[in-house]
């Protein structure tokens, strides 16, 4: 790599110093993560029914405890009865989900279960409704309710399924109508519970459904066309790969209920998937109904009972999505082209592969990223390959993660919903990126343009800096003029990389700028994936600490610096820097002969700005046998921290 490449480390000493600092930071981060996990487990244990029952019994040893016993014991009995009915009463736990300010200022009075509230809170300004408390409706833009069995922590239990017996919900709807606040009902139980929730649907101004095929049925029954579709989705603020181990547990996992008695076809499919997974390797089951004391007929078959690890609250289950190599799924609704369980989107968004029974919704929306075996043998083979081939697992996971974060997020669902119901709200800004390439090698011009022009699904412009003699300036101008919004800078050859970067950045107008090296390979989804990480990481700088390289002297494609994907870091490779233009605006690049990338990143850290290392894909560093690199480390030293993935140059394993 030449002067324009801006490799991160100027010398082996610099790399060693940063590596030691990064190692200390990594261990500190691991300790903090373990501490948080154990604290969460402690909260979960102390809030469990068995712990509280034991504590109540032990409290009998004291006189005050004996006085409290009847009341405490009666409360536990009521909780068990409520759980068996599927109603409120489960002990609350402290949520481990991040609190994110809403993207929109749209004010919404809401009735939601804990899952939907967590997913919609980063999008809308939610105010949970309480029975009899009507003042919150005034001034709201919208009343949004889902067909929740246990809405707002149990305050609206059965208010939707037994609408005729509810007083609070009709009162709330009447208040919204009087104040001219539009009301929307989201039936997330369609098509199975269409008839059950039809009476309450009649009372809302708008109805949205998870099943597109129910739309004409609603319009016929309700006598109006204010009916739309809203599928489940993922929330990148909480469903993302941050903290995903580089080597997750070598097992498959299923999280959900059995329900084979209610949905026999699903029961057969789930048994097929689980039997195949168990044949392939270790299997863990989190039974959502394990703690409810449900009907034994709803329990998993005996051969799976020893694999059940209990149940987890939603926030801990979200973290669990990242800890297993493969997740399993079975569909209760197989013929709807839009009804698909939320966990499929959430797991894929965490970059974990999904093996599932097939359905029309998967075929329609996720056919290229979800495995759908049809037999036990196929399930065993599929799960086995994913368990034992890390690179295959990560490539598949990357494609699913990208698709969901691009097309199936609650940001997109909410935007479509507000448009459907005619509620005009300020639109959110779309990120844009200026790609800066400083080059002192005229023969790399076509390579640079090819890298830029293959980028997809991103709003980008090119800033090409010619930093040497010998360039065909007229030809460059013609090429630049063909790329809307792009610029050509011709700067003296004696200017350093840092000086050239400062000049290029000064004219940037995008929300972000990205640094390209002139001889490395950037896959079609490189910028798209980097900008996805910008969205959920909140980092001022993103880049790649773990990356692929082709080492010509060894004729090998390798992965270098493993173990630093989707994590905060102290440095990333210079050719992968993507920076928030406003956040790093005050920080200039130093006029140094080499190592200006590492100095820039150090200045970012000193300013309190965060740096985030993304995935390892869609970027390939080229280590030429000629040794023409500013990073002067010898190839045999470079390879010490590498894992070979293929002989020769394997672009197809890098660009996905």
Image (cartoon, rainbow, N blue to C red):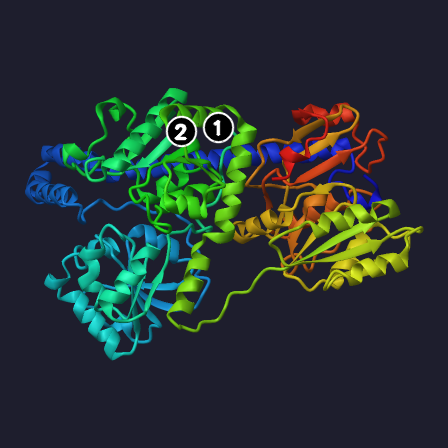
Question: Does 5 appear above or below 22?
Answer: below
What crowding class fits label 1: few (fewer than 14 Cα within 10 Å), some (14-19), or many (20 or more)? many
The residue that appears at 42% across and 59% down in the rendered structure is 413
Q: Is residue 485 left or right of residue 302?
A: right
Q: Position of residue 31 (x, y in %)?
A: 48, 33
- Where is residue 10 shown, x and y percent of the image? 78, 38
State which mark lies toward you, 2 or 1. Answer: 1
* Residue 430 in the image, given as x and y percentages of width and height: 57, 62
Residue picked out by circle 2: 252
Q: Earlier in the sequence, mark 2 or mark 1?
A: 2
Quadrant in the picture for residue 466: bottom right
Front residue of this view, candidates 597 and 543: 543
How far, Cα to Cα, is label 2 from label 1? 9 Å
**Residue 617 is at least partly visible in this image:** yes
Q: Quadrant of residue 483?
A: bottom right
Q: Secondary structure at mark 1?
A: helix
The total of numbered circles placed on residues is 2
**Do the residues bearing badges 2 and 1 touch, measured as CB atoms within 8 Å?**
yes
Residue that numbered label 1 is attached to: 386
Compare residues 209 and 170 and report the one nearer the observer: 209
Residue beneath the point at 23% across and 68% down:
222
Quarter of the image with the N terminus in it: top right
Q: Up-down: is 394 above or below 385?
A: below
Give coordinates of residue 263: x percent, y percent.
23, 39
């Amino acid at each position: 790599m030449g002067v324009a490449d801006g490799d991160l480390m100027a010398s082996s000493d610099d790399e060693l110093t940063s590596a030691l600092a990064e190692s200390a930071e990594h261990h500190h981060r691991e300790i903090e993560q373990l501490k948080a996990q154990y604290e969460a487990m402690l909260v979960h244990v102390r809030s469990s029914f068995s712990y509280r029952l034991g504590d109540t019994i032990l409290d009998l040893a004291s006189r005050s405890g004996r006085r409290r016993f009847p009341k405490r014991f009666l409360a536990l009995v009521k909780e068990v009865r409520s759980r068996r009915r599927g109603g409120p009463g489960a002990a609350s736990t402290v949520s481990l989900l991040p609190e994110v300010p809403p993207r929109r200022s749209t004010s919404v009075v809401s009735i939601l279960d804990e899952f939907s509230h967590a997913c919609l809170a980063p999008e809308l300004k939610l105010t949970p409704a309480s029975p009899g408390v009507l003042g919150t409706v005034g001034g709201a833009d919208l009343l949004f309710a889902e067909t929740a069995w246990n809405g707002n922590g149990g305050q609206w239990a059965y208010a939707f399924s037994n609408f005729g017996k509810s007083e609070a919900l009709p009162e709330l709807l009447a208040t919204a109508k009087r104040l001219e606040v539009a009301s929307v009902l989201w039936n997330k139980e369609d098509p199975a519970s269409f008839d059950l929730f039809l009476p309450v649907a009649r009372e809302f101004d708008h109805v949205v459904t998870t099943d597109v095929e129910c739309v004409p049925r609603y319009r016929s029954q309700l006598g109006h066309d204010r009916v739309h579709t809203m599928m489940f989705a993922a929330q990148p603020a909480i469903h993302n790969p941050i903290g995903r181990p580089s080597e997750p547990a070598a097992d498959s996992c299923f999280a959900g209920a059995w329900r084979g008695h209610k949905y026999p076809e699903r029961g057969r499919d789930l048994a097929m998937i689980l039997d195949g997974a168990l044949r392939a390797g270790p299997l863990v089951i989190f039974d959502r109904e394990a703690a409810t004391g449900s009907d034994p007929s709803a329990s998993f078959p005996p051969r799976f009972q020893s694999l059940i690890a209990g149940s987890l609250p939603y926030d801990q289950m979200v973290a669990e999505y990242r800890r297993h190599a493969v997740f399993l799924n079975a569909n209760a609704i197989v013929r709807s082209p839009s009804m698909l369980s939320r966990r499929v989107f959430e797991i894929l968004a965490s970059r974990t592969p999904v093996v599932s029974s097939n359905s029309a919704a998967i075929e329609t929306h996720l056919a290229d990223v979800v495995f759908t075996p049809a037999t036990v043998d196929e399930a065993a083979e599929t799960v086995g390959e994913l368990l034992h081939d890390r690179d295959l697992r990560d490539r598949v996971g990357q494609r699913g993660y990208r698709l969901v974060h691009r097309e199936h997020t609650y940001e997109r669902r909410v935007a479509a919903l507000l448009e459907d119901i005619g509620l005009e709200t300020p639109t959110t800004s779309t990120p844009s990126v200026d790609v800066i390439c400083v080059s002192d090698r005229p023969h790399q011009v076509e390579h640079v343009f090819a890298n830029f022009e293959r980028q997809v699904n991103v709003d980008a412009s090119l800033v090409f800096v010619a930093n040497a003699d010998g360039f065909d300036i007229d030809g460059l101008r013609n090429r630049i003029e063909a790329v809307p919004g792009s610029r050509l800078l011709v700067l003296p050859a004696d200017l350093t990389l840092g000086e050239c970067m400062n000049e290029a950045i000064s004219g940037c107008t995008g929300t972000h700028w990205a640094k390209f090296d002139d001889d490395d390979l950037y896959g079609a989804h490189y910028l798209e994936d980097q900008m996805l990480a910008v969205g959920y990481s909140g980092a001022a700088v993103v880049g790649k600490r773990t990356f692929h390289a082709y080492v010509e002297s060894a004729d090998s494609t390798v992965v270098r610096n493993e173990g630093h994907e989707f994590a905060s870091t102290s440095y990333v490779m210079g050719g992968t820097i993507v920076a928030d233009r406003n956040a790093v605006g005050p920080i200039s690049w130093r006029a140094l002969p080499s190592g200006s990338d590492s100095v820039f990143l150090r200045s970012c850290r000193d300013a309190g700005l965060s740096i985030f290392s993304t995935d390892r894909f869609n970027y390939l560093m080229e280590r030429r046998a000629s040794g023409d690199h500013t990073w002067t480390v010898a190839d045999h030293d470079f390879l010490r921290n590498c894992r070979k993935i293929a002989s020769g140059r394997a672009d197809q394993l890098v660009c996905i």
